[in-house]
Amino acid sequence: MKILENYLEDSVTTFRSYKKLAEKALAQVSDEEFFFRLDGESNSIAIIVKHISGNMRSRWTDFLTTDGEKADRHRDTEFELTDETRESLMDRWDESWEILFASLRLLTLEDFEKTVTIRGEAHTVAEAINRQLTHYAYHIGQITFLAKHFRSENWKTLSVPKNKSNEFNEFLARKKAAGDEKSHPLDAPMEFSEDR
C-alpha cells in the first residue's frame, strides 16, 4: 500500500509541476501571442489551453463513477475559438485544474482496485491517471515550445540553461547539504533559473 500512496502523491506533485511550468510559460507571452497560430494546421496557445481544460473537465468530473468522455463534451469545438478572451480561457483552465485536484484528493487506496472507463474502454485507476498525465505533459510541452519561440532571446528559461549543467548539479548538491526537501524534477530547474 505504501507504493500506492507514493504513486498518488507523486502523481499529484507532477500534475502541479506541469501546471506551474505551463503558467510560467504563459506569463511570458502577450495576448496577441496567446492567440497567434503559426500556420493553418497549428494550434494557438489559446486553443491548447481550451483543449486541455475541456479534457480535464470531462475526464475528472465524477472520475470513478462516469465515463471520462462526457456526453456534453464537444471535443471538436475545443479547437475553435469564438468569443473567448484570454481571461475567460484562463478562468476555465483554473476551474478544470481544480476539478482534477479535487478528484485526486478524494481517491483512497481502495479506489485503485476499481476500474474506470474512458470512451467505453476500461482502465485501472493508475492507467487513467497515467493517460491524463502524459496527455497534459504533451500539450504543456507545446505551450512551452510556442512561448519560447515567441520570446526568442528574451525567453526566461524554465529548464536547465544551456551550458549550465555543472552549476545545476552544484545547486542540487547545495540544496541537499542544506537539508532542503527534494524538489520535483520539473521544479528544480525552474528554481535554479529563478535563483540566477
Image (cartoon, rainbow, N blue to C red):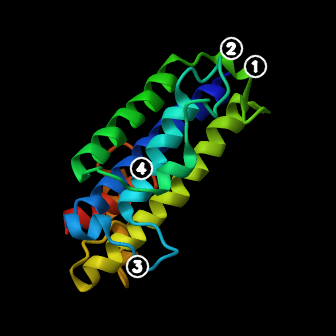
Left-right relation of 104 to 118: left
Describe the element under mark 2 as helix, strand or loop: helix
Nearest the camera: 89 or 24?
89
Q: Which residue is mark 4?
A: 50
Kindly identify the residue that appears in the image at 44 percent across and 43 percent down: 53
Q: Nearer the viewer, mark 4 or mark 1?
A: 4
The CA span between labels 3 and 1 is 44 Å
Label 1 sits on a secondary structure element that is helix
Which mark identifies residue 38? 3
Q: Is there any visible trace of residue 19 in the rendered image?
A: yes
Q: Which residue is mark 1?
A: 113
Amino acid carrying mark 3 in the image: Leu
Which of the two labelled residues, at mark 4 and mark 1, occupies the earlier sequence position?
4
Image coords of residue 151 (percent x, y): 25, 78
Tell which circle, 3 or 4, labels the residue nearer the N-terminal end.
Answer: 3
Mark 2 vs mark 4, CA separation in Å? 33 Å
**Label 3 vs label 4: CA separation?**
17 Å
- Give the x, y percent position of residue 108: 60, 16
Q: Using the numbered discs, state the Cα–Cα distance from disc 2 to disc 3 in whole angstroms.
A: 46 Å
Dot 1 amino acid type: Glu
Specify the label residue 110 is tagged with: 2
Q: Quadrant of the N terminus?
A: top right
Amino acid type indicated by mark 4? Lys
Q: Which of the two marks, 2 or 3, is nearer to us in this view?
A: 3
Mark 2 and 1 residues: CB-CB less than 8 Å, in contact?
A: yes
Residue 85 vertical placement versus 38 (above, below): above
Identify the mark nearer the N-term, 2 or 3.
3
Q: Position of residue 70 (x, y in %)?
A: 60, 30
